[in-house]
Image (cartoon, helix red, strand yellow):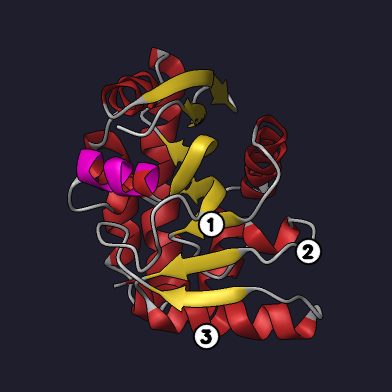
Amino acid sequence: MFAGVARRYDLLNRLLSLRRDVAWRRELVGALALAPPGRVLDCATGTGDVVLTLPQGGHVGTDFCLDMLALARRKASQRGRAVAWVGGDALALPFRDASFAAVTVAFGVRNFADFEGGLAELRRVLVAGGVLAILEFQDPPWRAVRWVSRVWGRLVVAPVGRLLSDDGDAYAYLPASVVNFADGKQVAAAMERVGFEVLVHRNLSLGIAALTVGRLGEVL
């Protein structure tokens, strides 16, 4: 599915979010001020939008969709950026324990086959004191915003995605997956269960998305 939408993924992200996705990712990157110095792993990196906004520093973008990584590599080359692009499954990352000072995930944890198992794997690759920052869509907590969000998903996201992408079914999956996934508070609770101290939990754009940031204490 992700390979099928890769070609126009960036265009549709900007269009369907009215460019709010750029601001949301900026919030995510800003949260890395809470992390110790060191390399960042951007998991479920897609076309690399998050890691390509970071200062140079030996950072890594990983994704299980090689078509997305090919586009990320091309973007990095065009911008003269040195990023390591690594194919990998978030549930079994190809990195040693305690390899990164921070891990970011933008709109990816919703697609983990095992959400808490994925969080535990992200914990494994973090140094003690490292930071995990998750940006994810949620079903908004306020009724009126939730209604608007669902109507937008049904009447705009799905039809426009079907029209412009190479896999229209993916853009029917998107709003359905948001409704069925944990909200930001539940994400924070799951992070605590696997050993993180939650530092930030913030709703963005009236709760359409949520930013949740945790710090790892002693490795369990």
Q: CA distance from mark 3 to mark 2?
A: 20 Å
Q: Main secondary structure of the magenta part?
A: helix
The disc, 3 or 2, on the residue closer to the chain's N-terminal end is 2
Q: What residue is disc 1 on?
A: 41
Task: Classify residue 194 by image quadrant.
Answer: top left
Q: What residue is disc 2 on?
A: 56
Quarter of the rendering occupied by the N terminus: bottom left
Q: What residue is disc 3 on?
A: 70
Q: Amino acid at mark 3?
A: Ala
The disc, 2 or 1, on the residue closer to the chain's N-terminal end is 1
Q: Can residue 134 be seen by looking at this rendering?
A: no
Viewer-closest of 191 and 147:
191
Highlighted magenta segment, given as a residue range? 116-123
Residue at image location 55% in from the left, 20% down from the top: 202
Position of 146 relative to 71 (above/below): above
Quarter of the rendering occupied by the C terminus: top left
Query: Element at badge 3?
Result: helix
Query: Element at badge 2?
Result: loop
| Between marks 3 and 2 in the image, the one whose residue lies nearer the viewer | 2
Q: CA distance from mark 2 to mark 1?
A: 13 Å
Query: Element at badge 1?
Result: strand
Horizontal side of residue 109 vs 68, given as left or right:
left
The disc, 3 or 1, on the residue closer to the chain's N-terminal end is 1
Q: Position of residue 130 (x, y in %)?
A: 54, 37
Q: Mark 3 and mark 2 in contact? Answer it, CB < 8 Å.
A: no
Q: Position of residue 177 (x, y in %)?
A: 27, 45
Mark 1 residue crowding within 10 angstroms, few (<14) / some (14–19) / many (20+) = many
Q: Amino acid at mark 1?
A: Leu
Q: Amino acid at mark 2?
A: Gln
Q: Mark 2 and mark 1 in contact? Answer it, CB < 8 Å.
A: no
Q: Check residue 121 for magenta coloring.
A: yes
Position of 9 relative to 75 (above/below): above
